[in-house]
Image: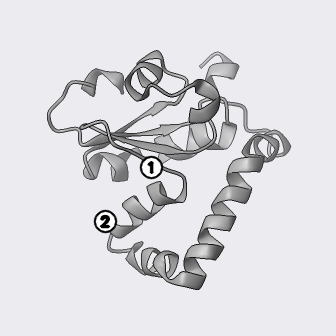
Amino acid sequence: MFETLGSPKVRGWVLYDGSCGICSRWVPFWAPTLRHLGLDFAPLQSAWVLERTGLSLSVLLEDLRLLYADGRLTSGADVYRFVMQRRWWAYPLYLLSVMPAGRQVFDRAYRAFARHRLQVSAVCRLVPPAANGG
């Protein structure tokens, strides 16, 4: 996963909360789709992520992030939009998510999930792999 950090074919990294049970399963599940787009993935808690973004861990953990190879950073619902826009089967959802009313609903739904992801993980008994020793 991290060995591609210097690889020229990597366009960026989807950065997720490694302490979140849902996030730490969901992002790797989508690895084939992400890699098809030239994206790798890593936990937000990775030392190189903190170094490369220059953001504090508390700020990083507020959102899912997309760190481009050139250093740009996309956050939150816009990370989902980036992926949906580039997959034919998700493109209709992308279109809905950029329409004014759709954007508002999509952004609010994302924010609600992001704010409660750890509680949802706990209720669903989704422990991050690292917490399981794996």
Q: Quadrant of the N terminus?
A: top left
Q: Is residue 127 left or right of residue 25?
A: right
- Taking depth in this image into account, of 118 and 105 the one nearest to the observer is 105
For the residue marked with disc 1, what is the amino acid?
Answer: Trp
| Residue 110 horizontal/vertical position (percent) | 64, 60
Residue at (69% x, 21% y) in the render: 132
Q: Is residue 100 left or right of residue 6?
A: right
In contact (CB < 8 Å): disc 1 and disc 2: no
Q: Is residue 18 left or right of residue 116?
A: left
For the residue marked with disc 2, what is the amino acid?
Answer: Arg
- Eye-nearest disc, 1 or 2: 2
| Residue 66 horizontal/vertical position (percent) | 41, 44
Residue at (59% x, 20% y) in the render: 134
- Taking depth in this image into account, of 123 and 43 the one nearest to the observer is 43
Residue at (54% x, 82% y) in the render: 100
Which one is earlier in the sequence, the residue at label 1 or at label 2?
1
Q: In what element is the residue under mark 1?
A: loop
107 over 5 or under it: above or below: below
**Numbered mark located on residue 30 in the image:** 1
91 over 127 or under it: above or below: below
Callout count: 2
**Numbered mark located on residue 86 in the image:** 2
Alpha-carbon neighbours of circle 2 within 10 Å: few (<14), some, or many (≥20)? few
- Taking depth in this image into account, of 33 and 99 the one nearest to the observer is 99
| Residue 16 horizontal/vertical position (percent) | 53, 38
**Displayed quadrant of residue 17:** top right
5 over 88 or under it: above or below: above
Q: In what element is the residue under mark 2?
A: loop
